[in-house]
Amino acid sequence: MPHHLLKATPTSNPAARISSISRHLLGGAQSTANPSFPSTTSVSSTQNRNFSSSPSANMSSQPEHPTLLIPGPIEFDDAVLQSMSHYSESHVGPGFVATFGDTLSMLRKLFQTTSPSSQPFVISGSGTLGWDLVAANLVEPGEDVLVLSSGYFSDGFGDCLKVYGANVDLLKAPVGSRPQLPEIEKALKSKKYKMVTVTHVDTSTGVLSELQKLSETVKSVSPDTLLIVDGVCSVASEEIDFDAWKLDGVVTASQKAIGCPAGLSISMFSGKAMDAFKARKSPPASYFASMKNWTPIMQNYEAKKPSYFATPSPQLIHALHTALSQILTKPLSERFARHREVSDKIKKAVADLGLTQVAGNPDDQAHGMTAIYLPETVKATDLLPKLAKSGVVFAGGIHKEIVTKYVRFGHMGVSVTDPARSDIDKAIDALKSGLADCGYQKA
Ligand SMILES: Cc1ncc(COP(=O)(O)O)c(C=O)c1O
């Protein structure tokens, strides 16, 4: 068995997972509401609907609130939020069917696929539903899956696959790095894998995986193996060239770089993945996450024909339609370049402060988030409330081996692309002054 290739065992104690997840959601150990902005924790529904006519320079026309710079959910554009207040309409009426159909077609552009056999899915649920979609439809009980792990979320994908009966081998990299091609190649030669999964950006470490060379390796050593990407923390901030890189599936969610409220599982599968699904000997192992149930619905919507399996959320689909329309007004290459440029600036500021990143190798560093090791003398529980006082929300750690030692700064979407916003400069200044207030001085 290659180095680091571990037989996956059921690692997750549910209580520990839930407490770890709570930290993730609550910005780390600081789980109380931000005392500087008490009203934002209870924004009334009227405030939510009525956008002020005098937008503040920084926060557009939304009620004043701390700038959310965690690695998802992210800040929203006004127009995306306003789309959520669309009047009620039938989910099988022509207006909504057209909106949903266009949304699916726009996803093909976002993922850069023109192959007619590629199949997009948009299903109510969070990013985790994408894991279930893969596990319930593309693997059968007892089939072998190689899970490349660069952190907490990669392991979670492996856990989900096991729930559906897959035989999971975890190729686990040391914290802050990713499995390397030679060891992946060795693993692929050791066994016939039905699927390889990779987490493009593991949100627990900020480690970026390289997809193109990985795909070349998988396709040359084991051409039948499906390559499935968790792109929850990468789609719309990192380049993904679905066809050119011969990916078989990318699963993501609405609330990160796409910039739409949480609640949608968004995915794209290749013709080869869809064929693997069709060739199953056993029925899909889920009812709600069944591709058998959803594929005709997605195909009908895209053909602008009404169709029903389970009620979609029209308001969220409207928001996604707006978010995708905005993203696609400019070449995607510009969007990715902008995320790189802003990420470089943040990483330089972090280095100038004398701090290091969890993702050690610059080639392995994500461009939509930065996981920053804290100085030994500074605790996340002291720093995060100071950032909150400056109006900036970062997340605490989530990777269990280093959980108290770092914080996470999300820099995706409008906070990066909207020139009218000064979110990033504000966050860098808050980090500097927050660290100083915690008594830190660069050595
Ligand atoms: C890389 C990655 N995968 C999967 C998930 C799960 O997504 P969700 O929390 O939307 O279910 C997350 C959430 O942060 C993530 O960052």
Image (cartoon, rainbow, N blue to C red):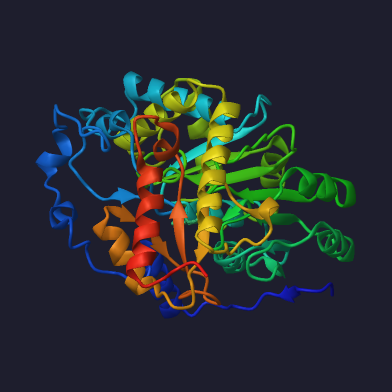
- Relative placement, left or right, of 298 versus 161 is left
Position in image of residue 320 (x %, y %)? 40, 33
Quadrant, the N terminus: bottom right
User: Left or right of 113: which side holds 289?
Assistant: left
- Which quarter of the figure has residue 115? top right
Query: Residue 78: image x %, image y %?
Result: 28, 32
User: Measured from the top left, where is residue 335 in percent x and y?
Assistant: 53, 31
Residue 407 to residue 286: above or below: below
Which of the two residues, 8 or 164, is positioned nearer the viewer here? 8
Count of numbered labels shown in the rendering:
0
Instruction: Kindly tell me whether residue 280 is visible in this rendering.
Output: no
Picture quadrant where residue 416 is located = top left
- 386 left or right of 42 in image: right
Residue at 50%, 51% in the rendered image: 289
Which residue lies at the image location 86% right of the left edge and 58% below the top edge?
185
User: Depth check: 336 or 281 in front?
Assistant: 336
- Can you see residue 17? yes
Decide which of 390, 265 is in the foreground and name it: 390
Report the residue at 65% width, 29% height from top: 113
Q: Nearer the viewer, residue 151 or 364?
A: 364
Residue at (33% x, 50% y) in the render? 68
Q: Vertical placement of 45 versus 434: above or below?
A: above
Question: Whole-percent x and y of residue 40?
Answer: 18, 52
Q: Residue 54, relative to residue 146: is it above or below?
A: above
